Image: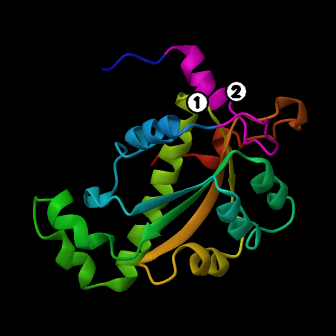
Amino acid sequence: MKPTLASGVLDQLFCNARSQRAWLDSPVSEEQIHALYQLLRQGPTSHNGCPGRFVFVRSREGREGLLRAVQGHNAEMVRSAPVTVIVGYDIRFHDLLPVLFSAYDAKAYYEADEGNRLTAALRNSSLQGAYLMLAARALGLDCGPMSGFDAEVIDQTFFRDSTWRSNFLCCLGEGDVNRLSDAGPRLEWDKACRFA
């Protein structure tokens, strides 16, 4: 059995980590973003399909495109965050399976069933988005995931004439801990888990 990570590491990844809503004026470097991707890409996906696609929005023009799509208090998050990642997926991810997965012809499996392919793309890009957040936290960044946005606007603005689609957004940077509200409760074991 592998050793358990130190409690400080677990605190940084899970116990003390919070979804941030306000950001300090601290930049996120290209080196940090590349390091983050090198970590997140190691997470498992079905058939090693890697359907997740990531757009790291840092420019003024990119931010303006996002602001046309976000709703409510999410607009201020996007406005103030150093980086907002569009976590998306490629609806033709299976075209790369001959390179990524050589055990058998998984491409044909997904080609034959569009519904299954789209479900796999969304499910596995969601996993990859979770890996992104854990990688960011491991590298000392805070995260602010959100789903309050108009996906059609995002897709038209950032993915026009492509096979990429948006899943969710996640702001990255150094969160302003002075503007955090109290942590919300979590479900106890008997409300969320059982043995079978």
- SS label for mark 1: helix
Q: In this view, does 104 lie above or below 131?
A: below
Q: Where is residue 14 in the image (x, y as percent from the top left)?
A: 61, 31
Query: Residue tagged by mark 1?
Result: 13
Q: Which part of the image, by quadrant, shows the N terminus?
A: top left
Along the viewing direction, whichever of 119 and 59 lies nearer the viewer: 59
Q: Where is residue 170 in the image (x, y as percent from the top left)?
A: 64, 52
In this picture, residue 122 sits left or right of residue 189: left
Q: Which residue is drawn at 82% across and 34% down?
A: 176
Q: Give the range drawn in magenta.
A: 6-27
Amino acid identity at mark 2:
Asn
Q: Position of residue 48 (x, y in %)?
A: 27, 56
Q: Is residue 15 magenta?
A: yes
- SS label for mark 2: loop
Query: Residue tagged by mark 2?
Result: 16
Which colour style is shown?
A: rainbow
Along the viewing direction, whichever of 62 and 148 lies nearer the viewer: 62
Q: Is residue 148 magenta?
A: no
Q: Residue at x 39, y 76 (%)?
A: 91
Residues marked 2 and 1 touching at CB (< 8 Å)? no
